[in-house]
Image (cartoon, rainbow, N blue to C red):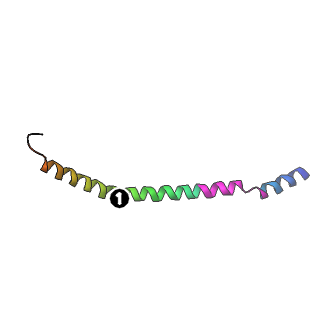
Amino acid sequence: MNALRTLLKNFRRNDDGATLVEYGIALGLAVTVGAGALLTLGGDVGSKMSAASSALNAEAPADGS
């Protein structure tokens, strides 16, 4: 019975699991925010790159030099 009591006391004092959960939540939040930013900005960047490519192709000489 004393060993069980000691085990429970040690378990209550050990907060490594709580720290791991906190880091996991922070990592999940960072990934979610990053993915949201990429999805939001991805369309804008793609359209700007397409416009730049079209502008460069329109100004390129016809003979390729």
- Give residue 32's position: percent from left, percent from top: 47, 57
Q: Which residues are magenta?
A: 13-23
Disc 1 crowd rating (10 Å Cα; few below 14, some 14-19, many 20+) is: few
The residue under the point 66% across, 57% down is 19
The residue under the point 65% across, 54% down is 20
- Quadrant housing residue 64: top left
Q: Is residue 16 left or right of residue 46?
A: right
Most distant residue in the right direction: 2
Most distant residue in the top direction: 64
Amino acid type at mark 1: Leu
- Give residue 58's position: percent from left, percent from top: 13, 50
The residue under the point 83% across, 52% down is 7
Q: Nearer the viewer, residue 19 or 57?
A: 57
Q: Nearer the viewer, residue 2 or 30?
A: 30
The residue under the point 21% across, 50% down is 53
Count of numbered circles on the image: 1
Q: Quadrant of the C terminus?
A: top left
Q: Is residue 1 visible?
A: no
Most distant residue in the left direction: 63
Q: Nearer the viewer, residue 28 or 46?
A: 46
- Give residue 26's position: percent from left, percent from top: 56, 58
- Quadrant housing residue 51: bottom left
- Quadrant housing residue 18: bottom right
> In terms of secondary structure, where does tag 1 sit?
helix
Report the predominant secondary structure element of the magenta stretch.
Answer: helix
User: Circle 1 sits on which residue?
Assistant: 41
Q: Nearer the viewer, residue 59 or 30?
A: 59
Q: Is residue 26 left or right of residue 10?
A: left
